[in-house]
Each structure stands twice: as C-alpha cells, then as structure tokens.
Amino acid sequence: MTTTSPTSTDKAPEPAAPPPAPGRWSALRPLVLRLHFYAGLFVAPFLLVAAATGFLYAASFQAEKLVYAHELTVPEAGDRKLPISEQVAAARRAHPEGGVSAVRPSPEDDATTRVLLSGVEGVDPDHTLAVFVDPYTAEVRGALEQYGSSGALPLRTWIDEFHRDLHLGDPGRLYSEFAASWLWVIASGGLVLWFSRRRSRRKVRGTSGRRRTLGLHGTVGAWVAAGFVFLSATGLTWSTYAGANIEDLRAALGQTTPSVSASVSAPASGGGEHAGHGAAAGAGGDAAHGVGLDRVLAAARAEGLGDPVEITPPADASSAYVVAQVQRSWPEKQDSVAVDPSTGEVTDVLRFADYPVLAKLSRWGIDLHTGSLFGLVNQIALMLLAASLILLVAWGYRMWWQRGRGSAFGRPIPRGAWQQVSPLLLVPLLAAVAVLGYFVPLLGIPLAAFVALDVALGEIAHRRGRRTYAGAGAARR
C-alpha cells in the first residue's frame, strides 16, 4: 500500500470564523421589539381614548369662549369699573345661597367679574357656582358651575373629567395613569427600534404594504416621540399612585410648592370696630370682612400683583385675606400676598420667582400639558400630538393585521436573548426598571405580568417542541 504525503497544495481546511458577537445595544433589540409589541397591543386602546379626549380638551378653551360669550364678556366702557364690593353685593342679591369663597375681578376691559360661591345646593361639592357680573353696571349676566384653579366652565369641565377618569370617579383615573405610565415606554422603545434599522429601510416613498405602514409609523413616531415623553411625565405628576410618590419625593427634597401664610392674630373678644369680621366667608355668606375687598385689592396692587387675581376671604377669625395671581400663560403670574382684614396691611408675600426649582417645573409642565402656557399655539400643538397618537395606534394595528391577517402575535424573543446582553448593561437596566416600577406601579405591575406571560408562553412552546422531537425520533426507530 502506498501512502501519499500531504503536499503544499493539500492543506487541511481552516475552521470557519465565528460570527461576530452582537454589540452591547444590539443584543437588547429583540427584548425592546417584544416589549414594544406587547405594550402597543394591549395599552393602545387606553392611549387611543386618552388621545381622543385630550384632543377635545385642547379644543375646549376656544369652544368655551364661544359657548359662554354672554357670561364671559361685556361691552367695553372705558375705565369706569365699579368697586369690587358693589359687584359682589349685586351677585349676592341675585344669588344669596351659599357663601363667597373667592372673587376674580374683571382682568380685562371686556371681561366680567366672577364671584365664586361654595356650598350651593345642587352644585358638586368640589365645584363652585360662578356668578358673572358686569364690572361697569353690576348687571348679573349669568351663573355657571366652575371647576379648578383654571376656572373651567361646564363644557371644559365635562371634557376634562372625561379625559381624566371617563366620568367614573377615582377608579376611572387608573385608565389615564395606566396610559401615561406606558406612553413614554412605547415612544422610547419605538425610537430605539426605528433608528436601529438601516437608513435604507426607513424610507416611505416607493414602498407599499406593510413596509409602507411601518415607514409611516416610524417616521411620524420619531418626530413626535419627545412630545409623548413630555405628556407622559407631566400627566403622571397628578395621577393617583405615581403622583403621590412624586409628591413624597419632592417633599423629601424640599421642593414642594409653597403657599403664602394666611395666619394673623385674632382680634380681642368683645371690642373694636372690626370685631367678628374674621369669620369664614361661607358662614355669613358675604366676602366683606374688616377693611373690605377694595382696600385688600389696593394693598395687593401696591405689592405689584397685576391682573388676573383671585381674592379669597378669611377662613376664620385668625386668617387673612389671600390675593393670588392666577395667570397660567407665559409669563406666568403666580405671586400671592396675605392681607390683615383688620388693618389692610400686607402680612406675607410669596413670589413665584422664589419657588423651588421642581415647583416651578411642575407648574410650567402642568400648564403646558393642559394647553394654558402658550395659549392657542400650545393648544394646536397638543391637538397635533393627539392626532399623531391616534394615527400611530391605527398604523400599529394595521401592521399587526398585515403581518398575519390578525392571527400573528409577533415573533417570540429568541431563547437565551437575555444571556446575549452584557452584565455591565443588564444589571443597571434591571435596577432602573425595578426603581421605576416601584415609583410608577401601573408600569411595574403590568411589566411584570408581560414578562411572566412571555416566559410562560416560551416554556410551553419549548416543551411542545421537545415532545414533537421525541415523537419524531420514536417513529424513526
């Protein structure tokens, strides 16, 4: 037998080079994709309702001016406005029920004065009855139920409550908190997925079918993602559970919203010109205590408080009048003063400029979220964001349908995807998710449920695959 020795041309084949290891961030893409799909599928209906009602709320400011034009406006008559005390007296003659809880003097030449009454039968306890008075003639032009510091009238109040809790009370607020908790997650995940695609695969022009829908979904989503994150963050500040946690955190950091001190020394019993005038406004049904509304307003004007302002009568014998600016448009006017009802002297002053940083950011964020900060421009921007969210939800469901005609539930995360993620990234990420889940429970609890469901489905599929493989092996034998 002859043997041949290997020559220089008969080399053993070299082993194939191993595939390149996935990058630190690319290993997360399957997880982000699955989370984006799950969240989009199950949270989208809540987002759709929030977007539709938010669109209506943004438009309600202008609608309110049209619907209630008679109550809100009067013909201009120069600068001959009557004293505030006379306007309040006219409102009380027309509506003696309840008690005066606040007065908002006419802020503009063509605007009415609002006298706010609390404790009125038939009015929601959390609302007030606003009596609108012509500041030039003291004519009462109507009375409407009002809600909140923004002075929302019935139309805007109804839409606001629909957006906030679907008119279901406290249980209904969970819907809006759930939507706000997940909106930023979906938007951020969508950005990661979109920009991780090759540039050539992001185009819309010249495409069709599912790819075109994906292009529209991704392009619009990328443009408006920052707005969604902002709406989510600001919406959570006054939610039930996350909002309470945010308040606790702000308190721990010393960043709560301050308030002017309305405490004054009670007058000695039994004497003096103003004895007894510190009683609560609601008790006697009148706002005139001590020096009266006109001197109180003059004292506030001397401290630089321009229109619009709200005057709150003393709550009891040891309380002062509080005059606070209520302008929520830019630049914000939120200064406030306390005025002693027996002397008319200012006892405390609080400037918005002295608010803690987080208190200012919270005020600006809420007013921007509700469309007050920049007026009509702000409201149009909110309506565009709401319309974009509605379109994104529609395109998302369309992609799902185009993918499997309504039967596909997305590609499962490949088994072992977690092991592909570097511990240097995975451990901090899990810690951050745990902290967020604690502070935002309507994010943390559903996220845990999503993960548990996906793991269970993966395990079921794995076991079915093993049984199928075993059965096929037995048949071959």
Image: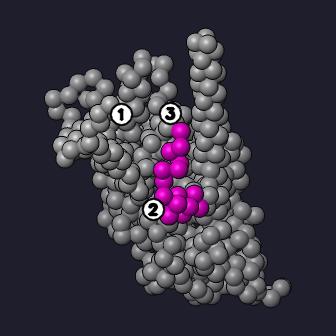
Task: Determine which quarter of the picture holds residue 194.
Answer: top left
Residue corresponding to mark 1: 391
Task: State which mark lies toward you, 1 or 3.
Answer: 3
User: Mark 3 Cα within 10 Å, few/some/many (few <14, many 20+)?
Assistant: some
In magenta, the rendered stretch is: 415-432
Secondary structure character of the magenta stretch overall: helix
- Whole-percent x and y of residue 238? 58, 57
Q: Amino acid at mark 1?
A: Leu
State which tag comes first along the sequence, 3 or 2.
2
Task: Determine which quarter of the picture holds residue 7.
Answer: top left
State which tag comes first along the sequence, 1 or 3.
1
> Quick one: quadrant of the N terminus?
top left
> Quick one: quadrant of the C terminus?
top right
Residue at position x 48%, y 53% from top?
421
Residue corresponding to mark 3: 412
Residue corresponding to mark 2: 365
Q: Amino acid at mark 3?
A: Pro
What is the spatial separation of the Cα atoms under label 1 and label 3, in whole angstroms?
A: 26 Å
The one nearer the camera, 121 or 151, is: 151
What is the spatial separation of the Cα atoms under label 3 and label 2, in whole angstroms?
A: 38 Å
User: Mark 1 Cα within 10 Å, few/some/many (few <14, many 20+)?
Assistant: some
The one nearer the camera, 167 or 457, is: 457
Q: Amino acid at mark 2?
A: Gly
Residue at position x 52%, y 60% from top?
423
Do we see residue 90 in this rendering?
Answer: no
